[in-house]
Amino acid sequence: MKLPTKIRYAVRALVELADRDETSPIPVKIIAEAQDVSPKYAKQLMNRLQKAGIVRGYPGIHGGYVLAQDPAGISVYDIYQAMGVALDLAPCIGRDAHCRREKECSASRVWKRLRRALEKTLSDVSIKQLAAEERSLRAGG
């Protein structure tokens, strides 16, 4: 399974916002520079996160983005959902998938179990935890 680029960058952008812990909006240009992405790409990510209610956007010259929720309540799985990325590792286990072999396929049961484990792991990790860990890493811990 390959981690989608938009998930990696969206997580990093949210960690950036949580790490700054500011109530004034952070311009998309600052977010983009801090994460080494283009402002256009950062804006696309932030728009998706805003539609999901994870960030709040403010237009204008002094505009930007702030977290719309406590970072402790934003999980990495929430970001997957906001970005529209499914954790389906095989086409036969998608939420709407119907496979004629489903009843006798032992492999699909393994893929479903793996998907549930991924969902749980990603749900158990918050942006607040990642921001705290990043601060610790920068401090040499």
Image (cartoon, rainbow, N blue to C red):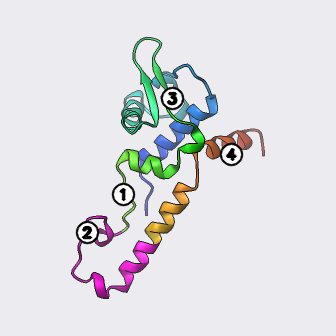
Q: Is residue 99 magenta?
A: yes
Q: Which residue is mark 2?
A: 97
**CA separation in Å, label 3 and label 2:** 37 Å
Q: Amino acid at mark 3?
A: Ile
Q: Are marks 1 and 4 in contact (CB under 8 Å)?
A: no
Q: Which mark is residue 133?
A: 4
* Circle nearer the viewer, 2 or 4: 2
Q: Earlier in the sequence, mark 1 or mark 3?
A: 3
**CA separation in Å, label 1 and label 3:** 25 Å
Density class for disc 1 (Cα within 10 Å; few <14, some 14-19, many ≥20) is few
Instruction: Identify the element where label 1 is drawn.
Output: loop
Q: Which residue is mark 3?
A: 31
Point 38% across, 45% down: residue: 83
Q: Which residue is mark 1?
A: 86
Q: Earlier in the sequence, mark 2 or mark 4?
A: 2
**CA separation in Å, label 2 and label 4:** 38 Å
